[in-house]
Image (cartoon, grey):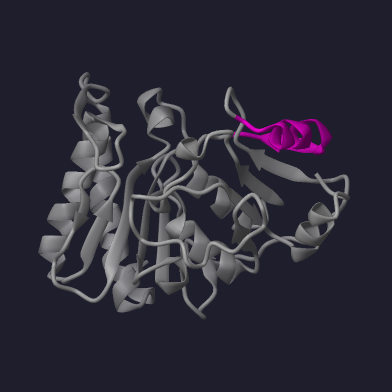
């Protein structure tokens, strides 16, 4: 597959392949869930995440690229380049540790902020499916062009982050949508909106510190945009200037059809 990709995407694809193999090795370990450190984001780092991230770092050295690195566990690593690779080694790590099939490795290459993301890639660690996009080049799943789907009122499929800290609006949408899913893997859920499998993804917690980091959304931001959708915060404010760093969090609304956004802002859609 890599021969059909640009040079940057081919490099990212090889990194994903190596990370996937590291994930498989780590998943077989009885210590995969052991807490081994506190990550740069402040969250606990399990052995599974650390081993996959280590493989990403090793792959960057092997590939000979000078990309800087922002990763959920190790933080920011300056490597002398103009571009930064934003990595979530295992998005959906709680799922992975319980062997639920909803986890990815998420890579985004760009500069400064989300608007500066040039390429994004999401690799499903269970199915082996790979989503990718480059700015201005469309979005793809395993080489096949993907597009979002038109919104049909009262026929929505919504991906919603639910649980103890979900906002009242999210709970309201859960009762109003035709179908509701909650997978616990932001990158994968947004990729599924991009491929037309669902209409909306929402992550809005009642405490800002429990919302998403750039590592969760940078790759999905580019893929969804190239597939015809859009992404903002829960107030429908642009997050194009959300920085490629770990020191901020944001709520997220991702949609496939702009008509849903218009109707939702008016209160006519869940």
Expressed as whole percent of the image width and height from the top left, the position of residue 202 reads 63, 44
Task: Please state, as top left, top right, bottom left or bottom right, where the C terminus lies in the image.
Answer: top right
Please tell me which residue is depicted at 45% across the width and 38% down the height of the picture.
Answer: 209
Q: Which residue in the rendered view is the most extreme toward the bottom?
A: 136
Please tell me which residue is depicted at 50% across the width and 79% down the height of the picture.
Answer: 137
Q: Is residue 162 left or right of residue 180?
A: left
Please tell me which residue is depicted at 68% across the width and 50% down the height of the picture.
Answer: 200
Q: How many marks?
A: 0
Residue 93 falls inside the magenta stretch: no
Expressed as whole percent of the image width and height from the top left, the position of residue 263 reads 84, 57
205 up-or-down from 215: above or below: above
Q: Is residue 47 left or right of residue 43?
A: left
Please tell me which residue is depicted at 23% across the width and 59% down the height of the picture.
Answer: 69
**Residue 193 can be seen, yes or no:** yes
**Residue 22 can be seen, yes or no:** no
Expressed as whole percent of the image width and height from the top left, the position of residue 198 reads 69, 49
Q: Which residue in the rendered view is the most extreme toward the top?
A: 30
Nearer to us in this view, 143 or 44: 44
Quadrant of residue 96 within the rendered picture: top left
Quadrant of residue 90 within the rendered picture: top left
Task: Please state, as top left, top right, bottom left or bottom right, where the N terminus lies in the image.
Answer: bottom left
Nearer to us in this view, 124 or 180: 180
Q: Is residue 74 left or right of residue 229?
A: left
Nearer to us in this view, 188 or 234: 234
In the image, the segment drawn in magenta is 166-182
Residue 168 falls inside the magenta stretch: yes
Nearer to us in this view, 96 or 1: 96
């Amino acid at each position: 597959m890599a021969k059909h990709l640009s040079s940057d995407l081919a490099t990212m694809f090889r990194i994903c392949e190596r990370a996937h193999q590291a994930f498989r090795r780590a998943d077989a370990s009885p210590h995969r869930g052991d807490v081994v450190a506190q990550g740069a984001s402040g969250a606990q780092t399990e052995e599974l995440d650390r081993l996959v991230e280590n493989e990403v770092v090793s792959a960057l050295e092997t590939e000979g690229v000078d990309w800087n690195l922002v990763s959920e566990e190790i933080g920011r690593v300056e490597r002398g380049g103009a571009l930064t690779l934003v990595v979530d080694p295992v998005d959906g790590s709680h799922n992975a540790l319980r062997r639920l099939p909803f986890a990815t490795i998420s890579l985004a290459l760009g500069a400064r902020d989300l608007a500066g993301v040039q390429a994004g890639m999401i690799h499903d660690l269970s199915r082996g499916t790979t989503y990718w996009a480059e700015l201005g080049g469309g979005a793809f799943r395993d080489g096949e062009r993907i597009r979002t789907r038109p919104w049909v009122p009262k026929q929505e499929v919504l991906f919603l982050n639910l649980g103890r800290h979900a906002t009242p609006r999210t709970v309201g949408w859960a009762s109003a949508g035709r179908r509701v899913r909650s997978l616990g893997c932001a990158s994968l859920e947004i990729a599924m909106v991009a491929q037309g499998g669902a209409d909306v993804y929402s992550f809005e917690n009642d405490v800002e510190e429990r919302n998403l980091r750039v590592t969760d959304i940078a790759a999905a931001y580019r893929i969804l945009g190239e597939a015809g959708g859009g992404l903002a915060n829960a107030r429908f404010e642009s997050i194009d200037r959300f920085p490629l760093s770990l020191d901020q969090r944001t709520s997220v609304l991702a949609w496939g059809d702009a008509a849903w956004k218009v109707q939702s802002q008016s209160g006519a859609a869940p």
